[in-house]
């Protein structure tokens, strides 16, 4: 008798049929194989599986490919295996689209069972159904009316974390006039790296939330200006922790806010702004105007261009420092402008000092070992 459970019989079932068709006994097969009769009996009765070596021997005995018996064993083994935890597929579907493990590591989601994880994802992405979670471009499905179709999975998750944090912050009513005035006041903070710490407070007084959120791995996002109700939210990734990058990206996003970019039209996440400057002519108009405003904020474009014409190709440290004093800017900001305007990225890099350590204590910050105090 052959013992098995399920719809797929063991290989021994087919061996027995073949023996009957040939008029062979199990002893005959054992003689042909050169093995004990008990070994054949165990296989025919389904009490023992077929090893790769036995599959080859049976193939020769019955004059069929060895793969025939190997596949019979494989099909039987699969039929006897227990069904996997249903959560495997659910977790795989989430991880195939979004960096779930990294989001858990960062404290954006909590490690839990798949059902609760899906529930967290819906709250995180501000939807009521799992299928309504915004889909990045490479996914099989796109959400109708999605405002962030250009974002990749890591950027999209980053953006929604920004929105989540912004909702927990209280600021006065937004004033476009006050922000325009503040953009002028921010210039006075560009001489000393430590003065950057005043930027979050000045922007908050205008009704603008400034947030620092560490980017997820392999994401080149630099910043974004998104809207929460009728107020702009500016988030910086500090991917490049340098004084020139901080002030350029911040002023770039302020210009988006002043022009209400992304308020009613599809929002663009600003990624790798430094690289995009080299191909400014190819950018959308709203990015061009934001870049121009940011560059002129960092250093007067006319003065910067005149300096380059006069000194090119020899930019001595003394000349750069003197020009920075005249412009009332930190030398690192001048150096940053020199880099992207001339392509000489080797020039005076020692002046590209870090500023995140000065800003983060005065700003809502998420990342770099710190989790913003917000909950799903």
Image (spheres, rainbow, N blue to C red):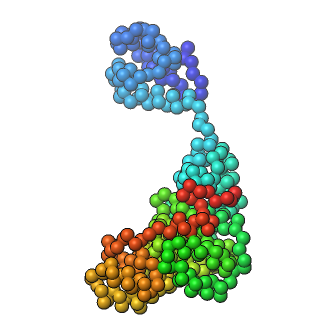
Can see residue 325? yes
* Front-most of residues 125 and 311: 311
Name the spot of residue 55 as percent of width and height, x first.
39, 23
Residue nearer the viewer, 173 or 40 = 173
Q: Residue at x 33, y 21 (%)?
A: 60
Whole-percent x, y for residue 281 in the image: 41, 83
Q: Is residue 16 visible?
A: no
Q: Considering only vertical position in the picture, is 62 above or below 144?
A: above
Q: Name the residue furthest left.
A: 313
Q: Quadrant of residue 200?
A: bottom right
Placement of 47 over or under 73, stated as above or below: above
Residue at the spot 52% in from the left edge and 59% down from the top edge: 216
Q: How many marks?
A: 0
Q: Quadrant of residue 331?
A: bottom left
In the image, 36 versus 92, the foreground residue is 92
Which of the image's four quarters has the C terminus?
bottom right
Q: Position of residue 57 (x, y in %)?
A: 35, 20
Quadrant of image for the N terminus: top right
Query: Left or right of 81: which side holds 127?
Result: right
Rendered view: 122 above or below 341: above
The residue at 69%/53% (across/down) is 119
């Amino acid at each position: 008798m052959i013992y098995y459970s399920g719809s797929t019989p063991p290989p021994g079932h087919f061996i027995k049929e073949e023996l009957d068709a040939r008029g062979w006994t199990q002893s005959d097969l054992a003689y042909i194989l050169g093995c004990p009769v008990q070994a054949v009996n165990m296989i025919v009765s389904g009490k023992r599986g077929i090893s790769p070596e036995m599959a080859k021997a049976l193939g020769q005995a019955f004059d069929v490919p060895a793969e025939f018996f190997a596949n019979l064993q494989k099909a039987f083994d699969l039929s006897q295996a227990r069904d996997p935890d249903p959560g495997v597929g659910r977790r795989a579907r989430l991880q195939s689209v979004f960096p779930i493990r990294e989001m858990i590591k960062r404290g954006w989601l909590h490690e839990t069972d798949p059902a609760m994880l899906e529930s967290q994802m819906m709250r995180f992405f501000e939807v009521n159904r799992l299928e309504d979670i915004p889909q990045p471009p490479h996914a099989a499905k796109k959400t109708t009316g999605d405002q962030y179709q250009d974002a990749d999975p890591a950027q999209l998750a980053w953006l929604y974390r920004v929105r989540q944090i912004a909702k927990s912050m209280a600021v006065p009513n937004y004033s476009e006039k006050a922000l325009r005035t503040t953009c002028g006041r921010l210039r006075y903070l560009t001489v000393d790296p430590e003065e950057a710490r005043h930027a979050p407070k000045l922007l908050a007084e205008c009704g603008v939330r400034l947030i620092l959120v560490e980017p997820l791995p392999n994401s080149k996002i630099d910043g974004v200006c998104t809207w929460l109700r009728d107020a702009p939210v500016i988030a910086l990734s500090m991917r490049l922790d340098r004084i020139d990058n901080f002030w350029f990206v911040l002023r770039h996003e302020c210009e988006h806010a002043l022009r209400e970019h992304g308020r009613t039209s599809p929002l663009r996440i600003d990624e790798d702004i430094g690289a995009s400057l080299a191909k400014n002519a190819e950018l959308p108009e709203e990015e061009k105007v934001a870049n121009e405003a940011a560059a002129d904020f960092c250093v007067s474009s006319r003065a910067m261009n005149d300096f380059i014409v006069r000194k090119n190709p020899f930019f001595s440290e003394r000349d750069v420092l003197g020009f920075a004093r005249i412009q009332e800017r930190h030398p690192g900001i001048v150096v940053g402008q020199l880099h992207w305007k001339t392509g000489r990225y080797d020039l005076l890099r020692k002046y590209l000092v870090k500023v995140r350590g000065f800003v983060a204590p005065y700003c809502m910050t998420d990342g770099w070992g710190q989790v913003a105090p917000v909950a799903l």
